[in-house]
Structure formats: C-alpha cells, structure tokens
Image (cartoon, rainbow, N blue to C red):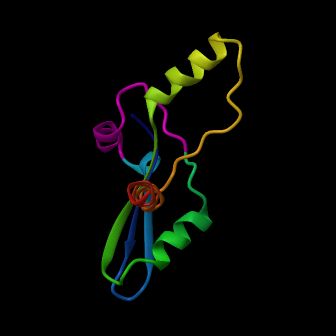
Amino acid sequence: MRFIDIVFIHKEADGNIRTVELNDLDPESYEMFVPIGEHVSSLFTNDDLEIAASKLAEGSAAMLILWENLWVAGIGKAIQDAGRQLVERAQIAPKWSSSFEQELAAE
C-alpha cells in the first residue's frame, strides 16, 4: 500500500472547519507518514473536504486517506504483458459485497 493523499479535518465546537494536508506539515511530521523520496499529491478537492466536514459532529476530527493498493499494479502489468488492456478498475464497498455473499448463501 502507498499513501497518495492524506488530509486532517477538524470541526471546532463553533462549527469552524480546519484542514491540514500532508504537504502542509513540517518535514519531520511529513516523514512520519511518507517514506523519504515518496511524493504525495493533493488529490482531495475542496468539495471532498466540505462533504467530509459536513458529516462530522462539532468538536470532532477525521483523517481522509487515499491510498494505492500496490498489488493491483502487478495485475495491470500482467495484463499488459499478455498483450491485453485493463479497461476499468473499481472497488466495491463492503456493504455491497456482504449483500452479494448473503444472496449467494441463500441460493
């Protein structure tokens, strides 16, 4: 797994929102999250942050994490090496896979 973007969100008691992106941290704090030499992109949009903040209770905080599953890169390479092309990749939310498993068990 490799972290692509991390943002900390704090909704203060008065409702004000504070965000800190990983790239905003001092070098020592940054290195706690990212191995030396890795680049982290700011991929979360302001809309993403606003949506996440709207779900927080006042006086609470959250951390948004966007990561890459590195094992998937191996699948992509294997597909390319076989002369094929990966058209689309998506992740299924756990609630949907649980529902599917229940349907299979019922059959």
Q: In x, y percent, where is residue 61?
A: 33, 70
Q: Residue furthest bottom?
A: 14
| Above or below 82: residue 45 | below
Residue at horizontal 35 percent and vertical 45 percent from the top:
26
In-image side of 91 versus 83 (left or right) = left
Q: In x, y percent, where is residue 104?
A: 44, 54
Residue 31 covered by magenta stretch: yes
Q: In x, y percent, where is residue 42?
A: 55, 48
Q: Residue furthest front?
A: 107
Residue at horizontal 55 percent and vertical 72 percent from the top:
50
| Above or below 58: residue 87 | above
The quarter of the picture where residue 85 lies is: top right
Q: Nearer the viewer, residue 88 or 73?
A: 88
Q: Nearer the viewer, residue 85 or 56?
A: 85
Q: In x, y percent, where is residue 47?
A: 61, 67
Image quarter in which the N terminus is found: top left
Residue at horizontal 67 percent and vertical 29 percent from the top:
86
Q: Which residues are magenta?
A: 26-41
Q: Nearer the viewer, residue 88 or 52?
A: 88
